[in-house]
Image: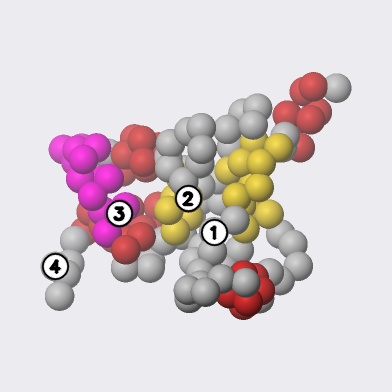
Amino acid sequence: MIKHSKQRDCIHAFLMTRQDHPTAETVYMNIRRDFPKISLATVYRNLSLLADMGEIQKISTPDGPDRFDARTEPHVHFSCDCCGSVIDLEMEDVSDLDEIAGRSFPGKVTGHSILFHGICPGCMECAS
């Protein structure tokens, strides 16, 4: 059994208020308001634990730091190649991808993670 932690509760509560998929550093800077002595290592450790427990999602991006999302139901993400933001990409249901992938794979597919990339609407406006 995992010991209860006020710091972990605060980290999770902070993520629940966010739509922008913050980095560990962003979480750290905001959590320090309530826990001035918290270390960045403690924030990383608690984010990893919350992800392992299925309380949050960890989103690994190819060119930047990991991002964190309190929305745990299956959904896909978009990473902007220009500004680096990560946003939820609302699209039709893709939950059958595991089954489709499993048809041509001799092992067992148990899940997937989808990260689309390109240019976000905000960067498209700046570029034109």
Segment colored magenta: 36-49
Residue 64, percent from left and from top: 48, 33
Q: Is residue 11 left or right of residue 1?
A: right
Q: Is residue 98 visible?
A: no
Q: Is residue 64 left or right of residue 54?
A: right
Q: Which mark is residue 73?
A: none
Q: Is residue 52 left or right of residue 86?
A: left
Q: Is residue 19 magenta?
A: no
Could you give the CA–CA distance between mark 1 and mark 3, rounded to whole angstroms? 17 Å
User: Residue under circle 1?
Assistant: 113
User: Residue under circle 2?
Assistant: 59
Residue 62, percent from left and from top: 51, 38
**Element at badge 4?**
loop
Q: Are marks 1 and 3 in contact (CB under 8 Å)?
A: no
Could you give the CA–CA distance between mark 4 and mark 1, rounded to whole angstroms? 29 Å
Q: Are marks 2 and 1 in contact (CB under 8 Å)?
A: yes
User: Residue under circle 4?
Assistant: 3
User: Residue under circle 3?
Assistant: 48
- Can you tell which quarter of the image residue 128 is in? top right
Q: Amino acid at mark 3?
A: Ser
**Element at badge 3?**
helix
**Element at badge 1?**
loop
